[in-house]
Image (tube, grey):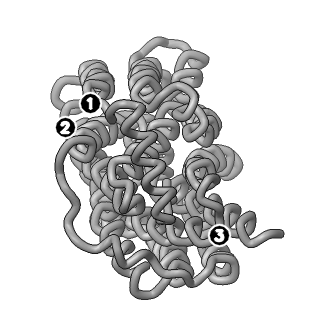
């Protein structure tokens, strides 16, 4: 196996475990966790938001740590943090300890992204890095898709599921230690970047999309449990459909090159809104909910790929920082969105909350990345400078 393929496969698996298992599987098992620990919608939202908040802190720390200690060390640490957090979820006896464990597990995603940026920049040719990065980004969907069958196989035993996820994360820590290079980041990425133009529009769009996405990431299992009286089998199938749909997001780089970033952005925000509505509204149809989940998964991963390309184009001389800005603000939006959705669900009901968050997704389309000519020029400037592009999920 070539070094590039080995790094790509390990990075894809790391994103799958950290995002699909450690960060998003909480929403899959929320109905079972709620029944055992008595969380309630508001507390569930704050716990889920805490996971996203942990990401916000660690993605900044990870960029600095990668500069200091290299890609291999930080990526291995991400796997270990995921394992510790998921083991904590499996053992949590109270809502407070569960909240701490969920935050630790979710923080692993922030640790994972910057070292993968450095690893891809070291091993992959510049003209293949966007495609490689968006392919690795689709690892989130693989993890989500796998978490559904695991839930079905163990009949919704959420503690056993998170224990199994923790074991997988430990094994991946060994793989990361063996496969990833010790390359360090580019020291030219230090200092403050200009908060204007495309960067500010990126911040606004990612915040709104991140907030909207929590309607399903944090409450999808709860919504179908209420609307369709689904138990473990139904919610497991929904998660599998979300993950399977998201595999299409690996094509984000190619689709943006063909159709333009703004068109792809608006189209998939529309599809995200459709997915939120079809899963969250009480249609009475299992088939409609599962199709909606598939659409949501495809839209979410495609949009994260769009923001990856947008961020690296907005800061062409600092592409890794551009990715960090987009994904950091996306998580900030999720940190704010999860508790807000939980409060709305308790105060006004599920249907108005779902409709409101679908509208937020649509409104994110107001913000444009810029003209195609500008993006082509930025991309060429980045290639001419020989600077690395970023990877993440």
Indicate the position of residue 319 as horizontal and vertical percent values.
41, 58
Q: Which mark is residue 343?
A: 2
Q: Which mark is residue 301?
A: none
Front in this rendered view, residue 75 or 234: 75
Reading the chain from its start, which is encountered first: label 2 or label 1? Answer: 2
Indicate the position of residue 282 as horizontal and vertical percent values.
42, 16
Residue at 56 percent across and 59 percent down: it is 15
| Residue placed under numbered mark 3 in the picture | 123
Q: Report the mark closest to the observer, 2 or 1.
A: 1
> CB under 8 Å between callouts 2 and 3?
no
Q: Tell me: residue 198, above or below residue 62.
A: above
Q: Tell me: residue 76, above or below residue 19.
A: below
Residue at 42 percent across and 75 percent down: it is 186
Task: Say which element carries label 3.
Answer: helix
| Residue placed under numbered mark 1 in the picture | 367
Would you call the spot at circle 2 few (<14 residues within 10 Å), some (14-19), or many (20 or more)?
Answer: some
Would you call the spot at circle 1 few (<14 residues within 10 Å), some (14-19), or many (20 or more)?
Answer: some
Residue at 63 percent across and 44 percent down: it is 145
Q: CA distance from mark 2 to mark 1?
A: 27 Å
């Amino acid at each position: 196996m070539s070094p590039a393929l080995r790094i790509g496969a390990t990075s894809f698996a790391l994103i799958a475990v950290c995002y699909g298992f450690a960060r998003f599987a909480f929403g899959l098992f929320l109905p079972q966790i709620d029944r055992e620990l008595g969380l309630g919608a508001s507390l569930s939202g704050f716990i889920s938001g805490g996971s996203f908040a942990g990401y916000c802190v660690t993605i900044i720390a990870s960029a600095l740590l990668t500069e200091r200690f290299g890609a291999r060390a930080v990526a291995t640490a991400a796997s270990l943090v995921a394992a510790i957090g998921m083991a904590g979820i499996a053992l949590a006896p109270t809502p407070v300890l569960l909240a701490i464990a969920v935050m630790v597990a979710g923080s692993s995603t922030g640790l994972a992204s910057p070292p993968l940026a450095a690893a891809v920049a070291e091993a992959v040719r510049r003209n293949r890095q966007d495609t490689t990065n968006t392919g690795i980004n689709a690892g989130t969907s693989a993890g989500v898709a796998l978490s559904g069958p695991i839930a079905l196989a163990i009949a919704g035993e959420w503690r056993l599921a998170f224990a199994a996820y923790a074991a997988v994360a430990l094994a991946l820590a060994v793989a990361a230690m063996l496969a990833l290079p010790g390359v360090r980041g580019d020291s030219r990425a230090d200092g403050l970047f200009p908060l204007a133009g495309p960067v500010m529009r990126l911040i606004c769009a990612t915040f709104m999309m991140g907030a909207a996405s929590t309607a399903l990431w944090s409450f999808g299992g709860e919504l179908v449990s209420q609307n369709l009286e689904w138990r473990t089998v139904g919610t497991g199938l929904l998660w599998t459909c979300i993950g399977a749909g998201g595999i299409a997001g690996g094509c984000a780089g190619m689709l943006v090159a063909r159709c333009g970033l703004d068109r792809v952005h608006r189209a998939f925000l529309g599809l995200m809104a459709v997915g939120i509505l079809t899963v969250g509204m009480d249609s009475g149809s299992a088939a409609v909910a599962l199709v909606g989940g598939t659409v949501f998964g495809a839209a979410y991963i495609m949009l994260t790929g769009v923001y990856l390309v947008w961020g690296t184009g907005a800061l062409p001389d600092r592409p890794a920082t551009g990715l960090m800005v987009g994904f950091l603000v996306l998580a900030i939006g999720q940190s704010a969105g999860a508790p807000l959705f939980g409060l709305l669900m308790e105060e006004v009901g599920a249907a108005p909350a779902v409709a409101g968050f679908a509208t937020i997704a649509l409104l994110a389309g107001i913000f444009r990345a810029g003209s195609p000519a500008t993006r082509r020029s930025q991309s060429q400037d980045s290639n001419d400078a020989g600077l690395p592009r970023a990877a993440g999920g």
